[in-house]
Amino acid sequence: DAKTTQPPSMDCAEGRAANLPCNHSTISGNEYVYWYRQIHSQGPQYIIHGLKNNETNEMASLIITEDRKSSTLILPHATLRDTAVYYCIGVNAGGTSYGKLTFGQGTILTVHP
Amino acid sequence: DSGVTQTPKHLITATGQRVTLRCSPRSGDLSVYWYQQSLDQGLQFLIQYYNGEERAKGNILERFSAQQFPDLHSELNLSSLELGDSALYFCASRNQGPLLFGPGTRLTVL
């Protein structure tokens, strides 16, 4: 799985968009970019994933650059409950390796009033 | 409620002891994954089971073992416990799509 690099921490004002960057320059063609978050000591929560195209769901948007070397997770209107550690992970979705997620240190997002 | 249940929520024990952590996957999910999260190592994949069979291993110590039963629940057995085994242990399940994690078991070894 691709190694990912994320800033260790970010701040965001409540109600504003939170843009969390991730660098995955070694990602291979069949690896997806997945985002999870972990609020305090709860179990990680899936947010969104994508391969090439930008993706949007009820939680967030994912923008992947054309060369697929980096991506940005966008929380359009951050709330205090979005304060969490956000993990960007490269996942080979085929075969038995899926699920062997390699969590890095992630980005600690703090949303303040 | 995430659909994945883990018991117990908290477990305090002494060094040298043995404990069993239990996980019930989301209904219909055949795969179960175990992860360990300690302060110094972060979230690490331990082992995966699919429909009762071991499918993949990560950084799981020989003192640790797991199994998945016919009803698809899984147990993680930790023996000869050491202080460094204190951690959060998460179970996750999937059938298709992303992993769904449980709430975790916090193990404290004194």
Image: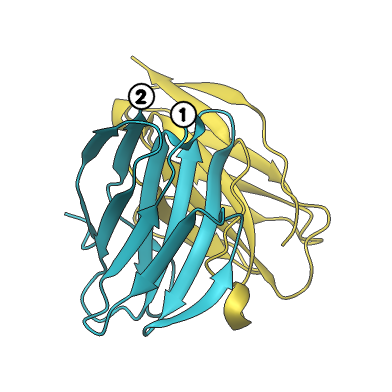
Return the chain for callout 1.
Answer: B
* Label 2, label 1: how far apart the Cα atoms are: 6 Å
- Can you name the residue that lies furthest to the left here? B1
Q: Residue at x 72, y 47 (%)?
A: A4
Three-letter residue code for mark 1: Leu
Mark 2 packing: few (<14 Cα in 10 Å), some, or many (20+)?
Answer: few
**Residue B47 point in image, percent of width and height:** 50, 64
Q: Which residue is mark 1?
A: B83
| Amino acid identity at mark 2 | Leu
Q: Residue at x 82, y 53 (%)?
A: A25
Residue A48 lies, in percent from the top left, at 47, 58
Horizontal relation, residue A26 to residue B79: left or right: right
- Colour assigned to chain A in the rendering is yellow
Please give the residue where the numbered disc 2 appears in the rendered image: B110
Are the residues flagged by discs 2 and 1 in contact, CB closer than 8 Å? yes
Q: Residue at x 47, y 55 (%)?
A: B64
Marks 2 and 1 belong to one chain: yes
